[in-house]
Image (cartoon, rainbow, N blue to C red):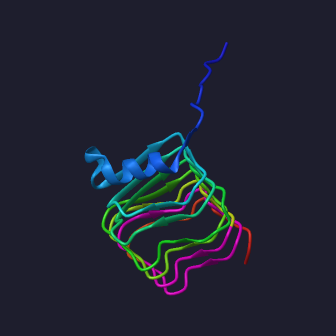
Amino acid sequence: MGIKTFLPMRKERTEQEFLFEENNNPNYSEQTQWVASSFNFPISSNKRQIDFEDCEFAESFTLGGSVNSISIWDCDFKNSKKIDLSIRNFDEEVQFAGCTIRGDISFYHSKFKKSVLFINTVFEGDVNFVNAKFNDECDFGGAIFKGKVSFIHTNFNDIVNFINVTFENP
């Protein structure tokens, strides 16, 4: 008899609940943190640290200019809209692990000061890293790029891992 693991079902969150936590929770004045949640409304946050785990996003997903740390694990971006994380300075780690991103995502002209993970993430839309700068390690291990990927003038100043990465377009 094997060990069974039960994953919690995602709890559907309301826009009012999200906005209350985003604007009024003193425990998270600098951080947005959600686990096992489903969002059927546009998500927008301007906190310094973003942390989503096992979440589902049905609408747009935008982050304000003060966001400098992202941790997004096992999330599903169901919308086909663009996620624009361009012209950013990420002072802390950026992590997208085990995610499915159906829309386009752009890191145009962004600077990553600490390590970056895009492991086991499926990018179904186009991905833009034009003029991006990675100052620390970057790991794309197991990622799947189904759309166009652009690394034009991208600068990697440390180790970059492309082990088991699939590029479905030239």
Q: Is residue 91 left or right of residue 102?
A: left
| Residue 74 higher or lower than 80, as above or below | above
Which residue shows up at 39% across the image and 49% down it?
A: 20
Query: From what the image shows, is residue 13 above or below residue 126?
Result: above
Q: Give the quarter of the image for residue 66.
A: bottom left
The C terminus: image quadrant: bottom right
Q: On the picture, is 83 further left or further right than 64?
A: right
Q: Quadrant of the N terminus?
A: top right
Magenta span: chief secondary structure? loop
Residue 62 spot, x, y in % from top left = 49, 66
Query: Which residue is located at x 31 percent, y 49 percent?
Result: 24
- Residue 61: x and y in percent read 53, 63
Image location of residue 86, percent across then percent down: 46, 77
Q: Position of residue 70 (x, y in %)?
A: 41, 59
Q: Looking at this view, is 70 or 152 the one in front? A: 70
Residue drawn at x 58%, y 53% as measured from the top left = 99
Which is more toward the observer, 24 or 53?
A: 24
- From the viewer's perspective, is 165 left or right of 106? right
Q: Nearer the viewer, residue 162 or 115?
A: 115
Magenta stretch: includes residue 150? yes
140 falls in the magenta region: yes
Left or right position of 169 against 97: right
Q: Which residues lie in the magenta part? A: 125-154
Furthest-bottom residue in this view: 153
Q: Is residue 149 above or below residue 165?
A: below
128 over 139 or under it: above or below: below
Q: State how many labels appear.
A: 0
Quadrant of residue 155 within the rendered picture: bottom left
